[in-house]
Amino acid sequence: MALRWVARAVGIGALVIIPRAAYAGDATLAEALFQDGKKLMEAHDYAHACPKFRASYDADPATGTLFALASCQEDLGQLATAWTNYMDVAERSKQEGRLDRAQAANDQATLLAPRLDKITIRVAGETAALPGFVVKRNGVPMAAAAWDTPIPVDPGVQEVEATATGKEPFHQIIKFGPQSDQQVIEIVFQDSVPDRILPPVAANGESTSRPPYRPIGYVVGGVGIAALAAGTVFGLRARKLDSDSTSNGHCDSTGCDSKGLDLNHDARTAGNVSTAFFIGGGVFLAAGITLFIVGAPSPEESQYRASITLTPSFASDGGSLTLAGRL
């Protein structure tokens, strides 16, 4: 702990006595932001101090400002980001001839290294070879060189996604603790996405499959048969109603009473419905036979299934018909 504060004192203290301006930029704005950041940091208000240092660095990217930002980020708990910036400060300070600051930044990075949270994303060879394979961390595609490498991350949430052609997407959200949280994520696809059945395609790019005439013919013909059956039911009902009108003295050679007239009316209506069903049924049956003849069975059409369910019911005063079909 003592070494940590000595290193930080050397690095940050040097900012007071060494001019920071080393790059072109808005030096005046950068200095004002830097001074505000120092005051906030001295008050332990790291949440507001760090953005000040960040804005100061953006206005004038001085190495000393980056050192202060790294120190602030460390206090804020963003250890991975602080570690990265300390390493950057060490390298830049060497190039600038600031060996004291380079040593201080390097010491801080060395002290932080064991405390870093790290995520390792493992990808097996057969997984990496899948067509269209892509793995992302926090929405950013990862290069293959980054796989199987422990990557320092700040505490909080990390999101890992992976996709491949024909596979269910992989998705996992991982939450990291304050420090030294090491987690390994292995990309494993659980299920395959079933390929859609597509019709054959000719060399010119047009589909070679034909409409399923024969299965449609089954349905159309089935409807025709059902209509003929319904016509039969209504025809039988018409005959029964007509018979009822002449029985029990409702109708005779001189005429019909009110009951007889109602029965005659119902008989004519049932007869008309029967005729309509017979005509429509004949048309549908003929169309179904035509489609059946025109359509030839093929492997592509074997996926179609047609069924007709015809359920008649009869009662003393007539009957009914229930038709159900599926293509």
Image (spheres, grey):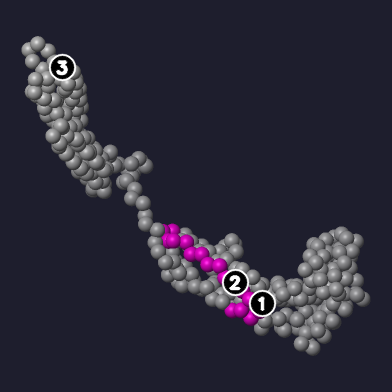
At mark 3, the secondary structure is: loop
At mark 1, the secondary structure is: loop
Rendered image: mark on residue 175? 2
* Residue named by callout 1: 178
Front residue (pair 124, 316): 316
The quadrant in which the C terminus is found is top left
Residue depicted at x 66% and y 79%: 179
Q: Position of residue 81 (x, y in %)?
A: 70, 72
When asked about the image quadrant of residue 45, the answer is: bottom right
Residue depicted at x 19% and y 27%: 277
Question: Looking at the image, which residue sits at the far right?
Answer: 17
* Highlighted magenta segment, given as a residue range: 165-182
Mark 1 / mark 3, whichever is N-terminal: 1
- For badge 3, the amino acid type reads Asp
User: In the rendered structure, are the residues bearing label 2 and label 1 in contact, judged by CB atoms less than 8 Å apart?
Assistant: no
Q: Position of residue 171 (x, y in %)?
A: 51, 64
Bin the neighbour count of mark 1 within 10 Å (Cα to Cα): few under 14, some 14-19, many 20 and up.
some
Residue depicted at x 37% and y 42%: 205
Q: Position of residue 272 (x, y in %)?
A: 19, 22
Q: Determine whether 81 is above or below 318 in the image.
A: below
Question: Looking at the image, which residue sits at the far top?
Answer: 254
- For badge 2, the amino acid type reads Lys
- For badge 1, the amino acid type reads Pro
Q: Is residue 150 left or right of residue 248?
A: right
At mark 2, the secondary structure is: strand
When asked about the image quadrant of residue 239, the answer is: top left
The mark lying in front, picked from 1 and 3, is 3
Q: Position of residue 181 (x, y in %)?
A: 61, 79
Rendered image: mark on residue 89? none
